[in-house]
Image (cartoon, grey):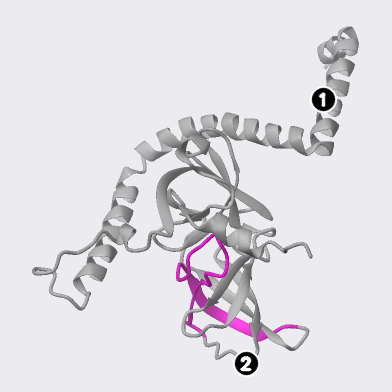
Amino acid sequence: MQQIINFVLRNKTFLVFLLLFGLSLFFTIQSHSYHKSKFINSSNFVTGTVYQTANGIGQYFNLTKENKALLEENRMLKSIVHNLDVDTSKTILKDSLKLNPHFKFRTADVYKNSYSQSTNYLTINKGKKDSIKIDHGVITSQGIVGIVENTSQNFSSVLSILNTRSRINAQLKKTNHIGSLVWNTESAEFAQLIDISKFAPVAIGDTIITGGQSTIFPKGILIGTVNSFKIDSGGDSYIVTVKLFNDMTNIGHVYVIENLQASEIKSLQKPKDD
């Protein structure tokens, strides 16, 4: 203990300098949006590189589980193809990714995934050089994951649906009743669908999907099923507890969605000057 005290006393000037320098950097980053943006992008690169190394080791020991997930996804795709109302032996099937040219899908690996805080994020191994941009949607074969919030050259941070800042357009699959998917921080298994009209025919077990009324997710991406519901304090709408299809504590591979018509849609939605 005495040695530690002696070290502090011998180097007190240098330690005070480091403290003041750190505080000045902190306040500069917090008060200037440009500096804050550059700091976040740099952090994405550094943390992304660290997580890439750690994830590579983890993936080696997780190959069996990943293969099972891929086999299950292939099984689902084959089931869809073979249940089409066509004779697949005589019909030339088109590439499903080319049937709707409005969206482009890119694959990515998750290097970091938090789910136990109130503001959770994921780090993925694709960034600006892979044409990943802010506001691209992120999903798995099971359902939605989140929205790209920041990018560096090689990595991106994703605002998880398990984040109090997340708000995603969603609807009942069986009707056109629209609401917003939010998270109350109570459980990683459930999210909440709010602003659903009290006249909507909600029932336990109903499927919840993306509503398609934003430029981020196409309509029909799976989210989860109704676990319970109640009238909110205002008495005009439901608060629906949604059991998520995704196990948000176990996300390995994702698809990043780019809406190729997003710029055109946003330009039309901008208010025009009188």
The residue beneath circle 1 is: 22
In the image: residue 239, left or right of residue 273 = left
**Residue 39, horizontal then vertical, whole percent:** 70, 32
* Relative vertical location of residue 253 with respect to residue 36 in this rendering, above or below: below
Q: CA distance from mark 2 to mark 1?
A: 55 Å
| Quadrant housing residue 73 | bottom left
Residue placed farthest to the front in the image?
274
Kind of residue at disc 2: Phe
Mark whose residue sits in front, 2 or 1: 2
Rate crowding at label 2 as few (under 14), some (14 to 19) or many (20 or more) other CA atoms within 10 Å. few
Residue range of the region highlighted in magenta in the rendering: 204-232
| Quadrant housing residue 178 | bottom right
Rate crowding at label 1 as few (under 14), some (14 to 19) or many (20 or more) other CA atoms within 10 Å. few
Residue 45 magenta = no
Q: Which mark is residue 199?
A: 2
The residue shown at (32%, 43%) is: 63
| Quadrant housing residue 71 | bottom left
Secondary element at image label 1: helix
**Residue 265, horizontal then vertical, whole percent:** 57, 62
Residue placed farthest to the left in the image?
90
Q: Which of the two residues, 86 or 77, is positioned nearer the viewer here?
A: 86
Which sits earlier in the primary sequence, circle 2 or circle 1? 1
Q: Which of the two residues, 159 or 38, is positioned nearer the viewer here?
A: 38
The residue shown at (58%, 89%) is: 200
Indicate the quadrant containing the C terminus: top left, top right, bottom left or bottom right: bottom right
The residue shown at (26%, 70%) is: 80
Q: Is residue 62 visible?
A: yes
**Residue 1, horizontal then vertical, whole percent:** 82, 17
Kind of residue at disc 1: Gly
* Relative vertical location of residue 33 with respect to residue 229 in this rendering, above or below: above
Find out whether the residues at labels 2 and 1 contact each other: C-beta distance under 8 Å. no
